[in-house]
Image (tube, rainbow, N blue to C red):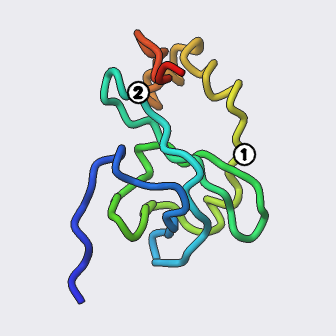
Amino acid sequence: MPDPDPIGWRGVIYGTRVTTEDGASVGTVREMLGSDAEDIFHGVRVKLTAHGRDVMIPADDVTALTTDEVRTDLSRAAVESLPTYDEVATYHLASVGWLRKHLGWAKDSTSDEEPG
């Protein structure tokens, strides 16, 4: 069976499996993080299978997005050692210059929320 075609970050759905550099499944997608208004992909919020907690894999560590999986170049140990995802702390990364430059985080110019 051929490999699934790549998709854009907005096309990844909740529950898609997340795999490591060697193909091991480490969790599932909880949320794709980015700015719809500016079409910038920041990373993936992942629910870890082994620990039941959420972590964030930065976009720079994501190597493939398909309908079947999100693949990272990190090892299982590296993914599992990521800090627990904190929505408030993640939003405030933009206020620290070197992190903004390194991770590509910036506050959206407009809200991504839909009315209602």
**Tag 2 secondary structure:** strand
Residue 51, percent across and down? 78, 64
Tell me the residue at 68%/62% (across/down). Answer: 48
Quadrant for the C terminus in the image: top right
Return the residue nearer the eye: 64 or 103: 64
The N terminus, quarter of image: bottom left
Locate residue 26: give its quadrant.
bottom right
Q: Is residue 95 above or below residue 42?
A: above
Residue type marked 1? Pro
Vertical arrangement, residue 30 with respect to residue 28, above or below: above
Give the CA separation, mark 1 to mark 2. Answer: 22 Å
Q: Residues within 10 Å of mark 1 (few under 14, many from 20)?
A: few
Q: Which residue is at a point 77% across and 61% down the rendered structure image?
A: 52
Badge 2 is on which residue?
35
Q: Is residue 81 left or right of residue 67?
A: right
| Amino acid type, label 2 | Ser
Say whether disc 1 or disc 2 marks the residue closer to the N-terminus. 2
Number of labelled discs?
2
Check the image and name the residue furthest to the bottom: 1
Question: Is 47 placed left or right of 108 in the picture?
Answer: right
- Comparing labels 1 and 2, the label whose residue is closer to the camera: 2
Seen in the picture, residue 77 relative to 92 is either above or below; the reply is: below
**Residue 104 rendering spot, x and y as whole percentages:** 42, 27
Q: Is residue 53 above or below residue 93?
A: below
Q: Position of residue 82 (x, y in %)?
A: 67, 50
Q: Residue at x 37, y 28 (%)?
A: 36
Question: Could you tell me which residue is drawn at 24 percent across and 61 percent down?
Answer: 6
The x and y percentages for residue 35 are 41, 27
Q: Which mark is residue 83?
A: 1
